Image (cartoon, helix red, strand yellow):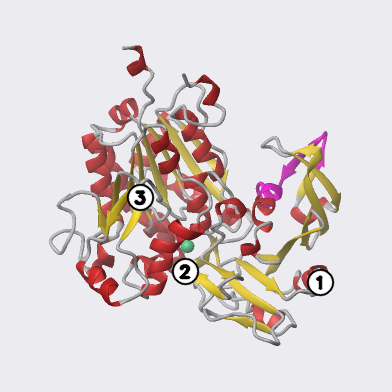
Amino acid sequence: MAIFDETPKPVLLLVLDGIRPDVLRAAIEEGETPNLGALADRGEALWDAVSVFPSITPAATAAIATGEAPAKSGIVGHAWYDERERRVVIYGAMTETVMATGPIKVFHNNVWRMNRDDLHAATLFETLHDRGFDGACVNFPVRRGPHTHPIRMKSVENYRKNGRYLGASVEGPKEYFMGDLFYSRETGFNGRKASGGLRRSAGINDEYAARVGAMLVREKSAPFNLVYFFKGDSIAHHHGLEAQREWLKTADGYVGRIFAAAGGVDRLLEDYAVLALSDHGHAPLLPGRRHVDLRRLLGLKVSSGIKARFGRNDDAVVVPNGRSALIYLRDGIERGPLAEGLVGRRGVDLAAWSEDGWGHALGSGGLLRFRPGAGPADPFGRTWELDGDPRALDLGVADGGVRYGDYPDALERLWGCMHAPRCGDLILSAEPGYTFGEVSGGYHKASDHGSLHAEDSNVFMLAGGFGEGERAPRRITDVAPMLLDHFGAGKTAEPSVL
Ligand SMILES: [Zn+2]
């Protein structure tokens, strides 16, 4: 029977999109979110864990699901320029737009193409399945797995028969639920009677996530469960951080419903290891002149917008991603001088690029070149060869170590982005208060994210019910490795697996 004693505790992973750690922390301290507060009390709470760069949902959710930064996951932002297809690929910018009935092509990109074609790294669902652990996923956008799930929604199925974009099914974990679009079994929560219907975003909403999440823990149906709440991000975009804090009461109620279904938080933490986190933070925007329009700043012939592509005379294709921007350059255009012309302009904080095997970061503090190698160690243990002015990234270098200031985990995050052709030839990060907007030319009004700065890069991490030696991940890229280790399926755990 010993083998059963060795069975790892099931895991419940709760991702709350775009919740700023200080906003949640204040809500917990004031008793506004008792369920998340109880989880924080009973386990480990980190308020300065770190997202990837760009700190934007598709890149960050891919990092959570795979453990890889954008250069290796292949998912670099809301939108990027595909040099091979010579067009911009858009997964959808405003979460709500995609989650709603939005343009079918964006829907196709987000639901089908991103997981099937563009995602280069194995997901937790795939790796755990290979080791004998089934997964369950509710609404999370990165969910590739070994099981085939047909489209359930008639209106989409009808469109599919007449159109050319949508596939008949997607690949996901054993249990996969995404509103009325996909559900691996009947829950009673779909269709007009429940939270479904086209008018309610095809049933894809946080209420639905709470109901299915509660069902999953009540039934103890899967070893690995991933439940995604996305509304808090769009609330912040449209109404700011005060509104996000207010919304957290509702979100906490959803989390509480899942806890109650397990028999309360203490019982839940006996039966499950629970990890709750956000994928990125949020940076409030200035009331006016918050939009930085790169078309005017570059001083080049630029193609931009959803149909951007290199025409015969174009020097650059620009793809804004909120508070970051990916710039693709025609061969022969030098990045250094271009970066120098941009940094310090209103709203442009940093420019980064890769050249001659070095990462380059230009900020108001100067130019820093960096690459992994002999040199000071960062707080996560990687050593770096540095050349130039560390103030470019607000680094403190002393006693053989690197300390981060305004840009958490800056070296690793820039390094984990700039090597992918998809990330462009020059990457920009906006100053707090500003945004480069969306690929469509629009921009959020109250708050946005995507930059290297702590405001949109820091995330919370609450871990409860794990074993003695299991520490809460300090970066979202550490979540998948930590959970694989938990299941005895990780790289470090491999030798001990019999
Ligand atoms: Zn967002």
SS type, badge 3:
strand
Label 3 sits on residue: 172
Q: Mark 1 belongs to which amino acid?
A: Glu
Q: Residue at x 38, y 52 (%)?
A: 140
* Number of other residues with Cα within 10 Å of mark 3, as a class: few under 14, some 14 to 19, many 20 or more: many
SS of the residue under disc 1: loop
Above or below, 400 against 351 in this view is above
Whole-percent x and y of residue 115? 44, 56
Q: Which amino acid does label 2 sit on?
A: Ala
In whole angstroms, how far apart are the C-alphas of marks 1 and 2? 30 Å
If you read the primary sequence from the N terminus, does the residue marked by circle 3 or circle 2 appear first? Answer: 2
Disc marking residue 93:
2
Q: Is residue 440 above or below residue 8?
A: below
Q: Do the residues labelled 3 and 1 touch (CB within 8 Å)?
A: no
Residue at the extreme bottom of the image, as rendered? 313
Does 280 appear above or below 14?
A: below
Residue 111, x across and y down, in percent: 38, 62
Left-right relation of 436 to 378: left
Q: Is mark 1 within 8 Å of ligand 1?
A: no
Range covered by the magenta-colored residues: 397-412
Of callouts 1 and 2, the N-terminal one: 2
402 over 329 or under it: above or below: above
Left/right placement of residue 394 relative to residue 285 reads right
Q: Is residue 407 magenta?
A: yes
Report if residue 207 lies within the magenta region. Answer: no
